Image (tube, rainbow, N blue to C red):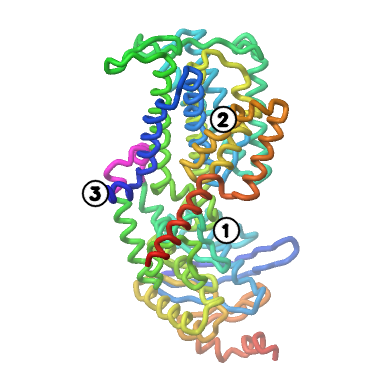
Amino acid sequence: MLNGFMQSRLRGLIVLALILIILPAFLGNPFHYELATQIAIIAATVVGLNLLVGFAGQISLGHAGFFGLGAYFTGIATGTYGWSSLPALVVGAIAVGFIAWIVGRPILRLKGHYLSMATLAVGFIIAIILNNERAITGGPDGMPVPAFEVFGWELSTFGQYSLFGLEISGVQAWYILASVVLLMAVWFALNLIESPIGRALRSVKGSEVAASVVGVDTAKYKSLVFVISAIYASVMGSLYAHFQGFITPAAASFEFSILFITMVVLGGMGSTFGVILGAVVLKLLPQVLADFQELETVMFGLILMLTMIFMPTGLLPTLTAVVAKRMRKKSGGEA
Amino acid sequence: MTALVEVKGLDKAFGGVHAVEGVSFSVEAGQVYSVIGPNGAGKTTLFNLITGLYTPSKGQILLNGESTTRLEPNQLAERGMCRTFQQMQICMNMTAIENVMLGRHLQLKSSLFTTLFRLPSLRRNEAAAHKRAADLMEYVGCGDYLEAEATAMSYGALKRLEIARALAAEPKVILLDEPAAGLNATETAALEELIGKIAEQGITVMLVEHDMKLVMGISDRLLVLNYGRVLAEGTPEEIRENPDVIAAYLGG
């Protein structure tokens, strides 16, 4: 039975859930929880981006734009207009999905560098709008965002809550919420990849010609995955806005877009759990490198370069391959 | 019998070069119809035009009486046309069997909602598609690769896998572009048998091929192209005795 469980297609998800459950044992203070929550939110965004980049083989260098739009939609709807959080999140996701569909139709006809440039431009335009529409967004100074609230129940990072009789702080409650959302994001992504739709998406990367002659409408599927990944970004942007309590146009910035893409490439394109590892590493790296101060950026670049040269398939796929090789050698030696 | 595929006055020019010029012919349902000719005669261009990868400069293509001249490849697949490629088009980021299951794309419509929650109906359809794909892999002779990644397969096996993928789409007509290229004698014999089996099922086969022994043995009719134009058309016997064909091939 244990064997059957390990063979299950959801074993990765179960392992991730166990890690998220055990992790609090190692989180000593509120700052650790805050970092873990941020990582979970970013990781879920990157899982969505990986559907586009890793599985369908398209690229987006402007994905922070959709993240920023989600964040600002939530900020404006809940802060300025007093909406409840969930409707703001859902309507924001639909609106961002629609925007992605509109811009995606023309630009997804492009390939390679041209698509990179076009998505880069989309990200820039969104960031510029958020910077310039001072009256609505607060401009470069940003805007405050109220605490997450559903049906009158408020989840604030400064609050105190009880869960099954256990006293927990606001950041701990946020950690739980972000973990659940991350698990859902991963579950949806896994279900999507292992389905007829997922095969069609992967075939667009594998061979667009082959896909089209067996009836896959490649333009439609590129558009679909672009919209799905934008919705992932929007939803996570909304949560991020509530969690941070304050947003600036940096949420939609070019640097943030590049960070997302780097997480995908570093962790392993087309590996859902790999890109989560990528998010963890790239969010923790600045903490570890804090001692190097001015050399931080150099170290960051160096680590990236070395990874690209020695682990072109990404961290997790490389590690898995190494472990599998060791196991084979071992069993071969015994036989 | 009515014509399943009909080509009328087809023309394709790349710049000033006419790759295909004034080509007309018709293929009846159930036939094995081969297109032969020297290198550069326009055979693959003709296939690319018929399957919608290229748009003709002039002329018309009819599938089952319907004009398909401006349709995309995926729309042609919906109408029962599928093909393989001279330069194989296999998704190397997928397993062997997933490549064949991809061929079931049009038969496997499921909503995004069903997919995201992996509802039982999707699981049932996937299991059925997996079974069907496995059967097809046995049928074309790559049953040894049921568990394999596409990257782990030999050249000959990949060629057969491509045929299995096309068959998975349940086509009315299947176009094979040089299926025997790069195969040894044994593999070619197996391929000939496979094409025979496919034709027996009632699937119309169109073939571009250089292996004359294979083509002459298996075809009901042949079209000979030379410099983009039709040199001859007829049964294997007629073609074999046609002086123009002999001249083009032997340079006489």
Q: Secondary structure at mark 1?
A: loop
Query: Residues in magenta?
Result: B110-124
| Crowding near the residue tagged with mark 1, few <14, some 14–19, many ≥20 C-alpha atoms within 10 Å | some
Q: Amino acid at mark 3?
A: Met
Does residue A201 appear to the left or right of B57 in the view shown?
left
Q: Residue A213: image x %, image y %?
A: 49, 58
Q: Is residue B116 magenta?
A: yes
Q: For the residues tagged 2 and 3, is the chain the same?
A: yes
- Residue B239, image x, y percentages: 55, 86
Residue under the image location 49 percent in, 20 percent down? A34
Q: Is residue B215 inside the magenta stretch?
A: no
B164 over A115 or under it: above or below: below
Q: Earlier in the sequence, mark 2 or mark 3?
A: 3
Mark 1 lies on residue: B53
Q: Secondary structure at mark 3?
A: loop
- What is the CA distance from the residue labelled 2 to the residue labelled 1? 45 Å
Q: Are marks 2 and 3 in contact (CB under 8 Å)?
A: no
Whether residue B223 appears in this view of the structure is yes
Residue farthest along the front direction in this orientation: A334
**Tag 1 subunit:** B
Q: Classify mark 3: residues with Cα within 10 Å, few (<14), some (14-19) or many (20+).
A: few
Q: Is residue B36 above or below residue B239?
A: above
**CB atoms at circles 3 and 1 under 8 Å apart?**
no
Disc 3 from disc 1: Cα separation: 50 Å
Return the residue at label 2.
Answer: A283
The answer for which chain carries disc 3 is: A
Name which residue type carries label 2.
Lys
Q: Amino acid at mark 1?
A: Leu
